[in-house]
Amino acid sequence: ERLPAFHQLDIRIDKTYFFEKWSINLYVDIQNLYNFKARNPDILNVRKDSNGVPITDPNDSTRYETYFIKDNSGTVLPSIGIIIDF
């Protein structure tokens, strides 16, 4: 079984100004423009009591009680920047 395909749209706008002995580059960058939520593999976790001790499975004392946590990732990530070259 495979996870669904991942995709995102990144855009960047640059403007460079040139001077006699140096230049300055200003930019705006947005990653994952349309906020795609990627599906990651579920995380297997162990149930714990109020003291933080793992709880054993009542049907099999050699195993712990476990559960899965759904895991999604992805967010819009804007950034701005300045690059100066000499």
Image (cartoon, rainbow, N blue to C red):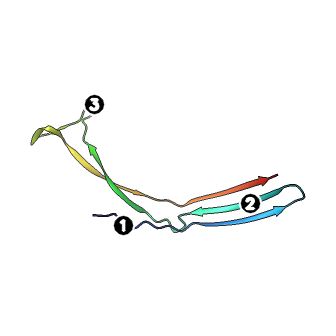
Left or right: where does residue 57 sit relative to residue 3? left
Of the residues shown, which amino acid type is indicated by label 3? Asn
Residue 4: mark in rendering: 1
Q: Which residue is mark 3?
A: 51
Q: Quadrant of residue 15?
A: bottom right
Of the residues shown, which amino acid type is indicated by label 2? Leu
Tell which circle, 1 or 3, labels the residue nearer the N-terminal end.
Answer: 1
Q: Which residue is mark 2?
A: 26
Label 2 Cα neighbours within 10 Å, binned few <14 / some 14-19 / many ≥20: some
Left or right: where does residue 2 sit relative to residue 36? left
Tell which circle, 3 or 2, labels the residue nearer the N-terminal end.
Answer: 2
**Horizontal and vertical percent position of residue 26:** 74, 60
> In the structure shown, which secondary structural element does the residue marked by tag 2 occupy?
strand
In this view, the residue in front, 26 or 47, is 26
What is the total number of numbered labels drawn onto the structure image? Answer: 3
Write the residue at 63% across / 57% down: 79
Write the residue at 68% across / 67% down: 13
Tell which circle, 2 or 1, labels the residue nearer the N-terminal end.
Answer: 1
> In the structure shown, which secondary structural element does the residue marked by tag 1 occupy?
loop
